[in-house]
Image (tube, rainbow, N blue to C red):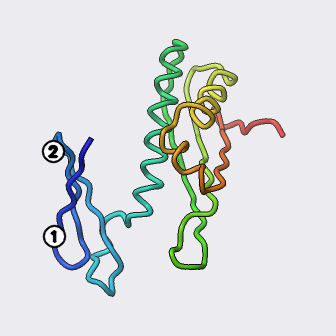
Amino acid sequence: MKVVLSRMEGANFEATNESGAKLKLSGPSDLGGSGDALRPLEAVLASLAGSSAIDVLKILKHQKESIEDLQITVEGKRTESVPSVFEEINIHFEIRGPLEDAKARKAVSLSMQKYCSVVKMLELSVHITHDVVVNGVAAPA
């Protein structure tokens, strides 16, 4: 696995993987960042959501469950000190479709506890929590 980061102008960059897929990144405006791309730590949150989403889809497919929609919102709280790393991350899953509630929740749980590579890397230094809403219903308290 390899990614090459190229500076476009100012603090704007483009990351390209070996397949040629591209991701734009932008730094702060005082360094010339345009603000029209993800900041690097936003890309970390997006990677966390994407990695977990793939796990959830794989698990549900294996269980022969189908979904109509999956939306994941990730919020990170950073430290005040430098470097300003994440200290807490919450991942909110919203799943819709003709699927069993328990299977959807189990798929998310398996991703968070066992399969998600990004969670496993980050949880060494960040407190990660998650919650799940299936067809508009939050988990029982």
Above or below, comparing residue 115 to residue 51 in the picture: above
Q: Residue furthest right?
A: 141
> Label 1 belongs to which residue?
8
**Are the residues flagged by discs 2 and 1 in contact, CB closer than 8 Å?**
no
The earlier-in-sequence mark between 2 and 1 is: 1
58 lies left or right of 17:
right
23 lies left or right of 50:
left
Q: CA distance from mark 2 to mark 1?
A: 16 Å
Quadrant location of the N terminus in the rendered image: top left
Q: Quadrant of residue 13?
A: bottom left
- Residues packed near mark 1 inside 10 Å, few (<14), some (14 to 19) or many (20 plus): few
The residue shown at (60%, 78%) is: 80
Amino acid type at mark 1: Met
> Label 2 belongs to which residue?
20
Above or below, comparing residue 97 to residue 52 in the picture: above
**How far across and how far down the image is residue 101, in percent?**
67, 24
The residue shown at (51%, 42%) is: 71
**How far across and how far down the image is residue 49, in percent?**
48, 45
Above or below, comparing residue 104 to residue 1 in the picture: above
Badge 2 element = loop
Q: Nearer the viewer, residue 99 or 77?
A: 77
